[in-house]
C-alpha cells in the first residue's frame, strides 16, 4: 500500500501524532518517487523469519515476492526520471547531483544517530553508519 497514492497515512486521530516512532515517508513521497524511478523495497520485521521484496517501475509493481532480507527496511532508487527524459535535462552534472544527495544523507543521518544508514553509489559503498546507542 505504501506505493499507492493517498494510502500511506497512519494518522486517524490527533493522538496518533504522539504515537509515531518510525522514520517512514509521509504522504505521497514514496508513490511520487516510484512514479519516476525504478524502486526496490526490501523489508522484514524483527519477529519474522522471512521478508518481502517489491520492485516498482513507473508506479507499476513489476515484482513482489517473499525474500530472505535483513531486519528493517531498505529502499533503493535507480534510474531517476527514466520515463520522463525531458525532466532529466534539468538535472545538473552527476557529481553535483551526487553531492546534493550526500548532503541530504548527512542531514538525516546526523539527526537520527540511533538508526543505521548505508549509502551506495554505482554499487560502491559510500557510507556505512551503524546505530549509536
Image (spheres, rainbow, N blue to C red):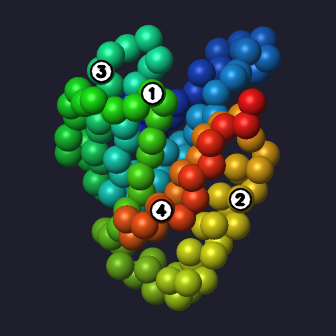
Q: State the mark number for residue 50.
A: 3
Circle 2: element type: helix
Q: State the mark number for residue 61.
A: none
Query: Which tag, 4 or 3, sits closer to the chain's start?
Result: 3
Question: Mark 2 and mark 3 in contact (Cβ < 8 Å)?
Answer: no
**Marks 4 and 3, Cα distance to the nearest angstrom?**
25 Å
Q: Is residue 100 left or right of residue 1?
A: right
Question: Mark 1 and mark 4 in contact (Cβ < 8 Å)?
Answer: no
Q: Is residue 100 above or below residue 44?
A: below
**Marks 3 and 2, Cα distance to the nearest angstrom?**
31 Å
Q: Is residue 38 above or below residue 40?
A: below
Q: Position of residue 102 (x, y in %)?
A: 63, 67
Residue drawn at (34%, 32%), measured in percent from left and top?
Answer: 69
Residue drawn at (60%, 83%), measured in percent from left and top?
Answer: 96
Q: Which residue is mark 4?
A: 125
Q: Is residue 122 above or below residue 31?
A: below
Residue drawn at (45%, 20%), measured in percent from left and top?
Answer: 45
Question: Where the N terminus falls, by quadrant?
Answer: top left
Q: Which residue is mark 1?
A: 71
Residue drawn at (45%, 27%), measured in percent from left and top?
Answer: 71
- Count the labels in the image: 4
Query: Which tag, 3 or 1, sits closer to the chain's start?
Result: 3
Judging depth in this view, the residue of 37 and 46 nearest the camera is 46
Query: Which tag, 4 or 2, sits closer to the chain's start?
Result: 2
Q: State the mark number for residue 106.
A: 2
Amino acid at each position: 500500500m505504501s506505493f499507492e497514492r493517498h494510502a500511506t497515512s497512519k494518522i486517524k486521530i490527533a493522538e496518533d501524532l504522539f504515537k509515531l516512532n518510525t522514520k517512514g515517508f509521509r504522504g505521497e513521497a514514496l508513490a511520487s518517487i516510484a512514479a519516476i524511478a525504478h524502486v526496490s523495497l526490501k523489508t522484514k520485521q524483527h519477529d519474522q523469519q522471512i521478508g518481502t521484496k517489491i520492485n516498482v517501475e513507473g508506479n507499476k509493481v513489476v515484482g513482489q515476492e517473499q525474500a530472505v532480507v535483513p531486519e528493517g527496511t531498505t529502499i533503493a532508487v535507480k534510474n531517476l526520471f527514466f520515463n520522463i527524459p525531458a525532466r532529466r535535462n534539468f538535472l545538473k552534472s552527476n557529481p553535483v547531483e551526487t553531492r546534493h544527495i550526500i548532503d541530504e544523507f548527512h542531514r538525516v543521518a546526523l539527526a537520527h544517530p540511533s538508526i543505521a544508514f548505508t549509502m551506495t553509489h554505482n554499487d560502491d559503498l559510500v557510507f556505512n553508519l551503524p546505530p549509536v546507542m
